[in-house]
Image (tube, rainbow, N blue to C red):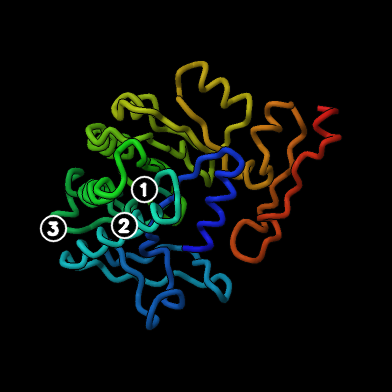
Amino acid sequence: MEGWKKVVNSVHAEGGLIFLQLWHVGRISHPSMLPDNSLPVAPSAICPEGEAVTYDGMQAFVTPRALEISEIPGIIADYQSAAKNAQKAGFDGVEVHAANGYLLDQFLRDGTNKRSDNYGGSIENRTRLLNEVINAVKEVWPANRVGVRLSPENAFNDITDSQPQTTFNAVCDMLRPHNLAYLHILEGNMLNAERNVDYGELKRRFGGLYMANMGYTQQTAENALEQGHADMVSFGQLFIANPDLPERFAQGAELNVPDQATFYGGDGTGYTDYPMLSDEEKKRA
């Protein structure tokens, strides 16, 4: 908590706003990262292909344990507790992470959710946990301080859905009456850059502010805003490598190149050591 307060205070000191992303990785965890070397949990006991990031390096994923229905209220309570902690740390809001193959996404997608109870089967049932998590978070934060992140066709972490358009149309229909701050969508598949979902349809169904993400440059982001495709555009890799990205965009300055080898784990290398524009560079720009 104290560490996050320092981060939040630093952002606020520069005039910025900061939302905390709330997430549970579900089956993408590993026993070595969990109390008593327990199994990760998931909607269904399906082992993902690939490897988990652990304290001891990359290790093969294990088959998770399917959550008992009696355990789900505890998962929801954990999200609410995290939302309260974010408030105590001084964050300006929270983003419920339901993307990229983590727990909430595992419940949404039919490739990972094979349940036959109220949390599986129909699209309504598969969206139930996300809906209940949002309701719990809204008991802590007003709706205009809560966002949601989705990734309808991203295959990261071995996640699949047979009908992503239909599934995420329903997700956005469910989200609409919540009147959230925004919907943050990773567009396409980060593994191959394919885009087959109609994101304009998702934006229309959600009805609120739409934040687009994945592979945008300054120019393509400006085009998306001008054409009404998005209300906001977010940047991941470019922001990691360029802590002063908005200023670099404004100045037309050269961008630092992200080093993907340093993205996960390790120390401050590739995390807090990218240079900002010097005063002399600002003048030249």
Q: Farthest residue toward the bottom? A: 36
Q: Is residue 71 above or below residue 210?
A: below
The residue where tag 1 is placed is 96
Q: Residue 56 at x, y = what percent?
A: 57, 76
The residue where tag 2 is placed is 79
Q: Earlier in the sequence, mark 3 or mark 2?
A: 2
How many marks the image carries: the answer is: 3
Q: Residue 11 at x, y = what percent?
A: 57, 46
The answer for how far apart the CA atoms under marks 1 and 2 are is 9 Å
The residue where tag 3 is placed is 117
User: Which image quadrant: the C terminus?
Assistant: top right
Please identify the quarter of the rendering in which residue 244 is found. Answer: top right
Q: Farthest residue toward the left? A: 117
Residue 126 shows in the view: no
Q: Residues within 10 Å of mark 3 (few under 14, many from 20)?
A: few
Q: Residues within 10 Å of mark 1 (few under 14, many from 20)?
A: many
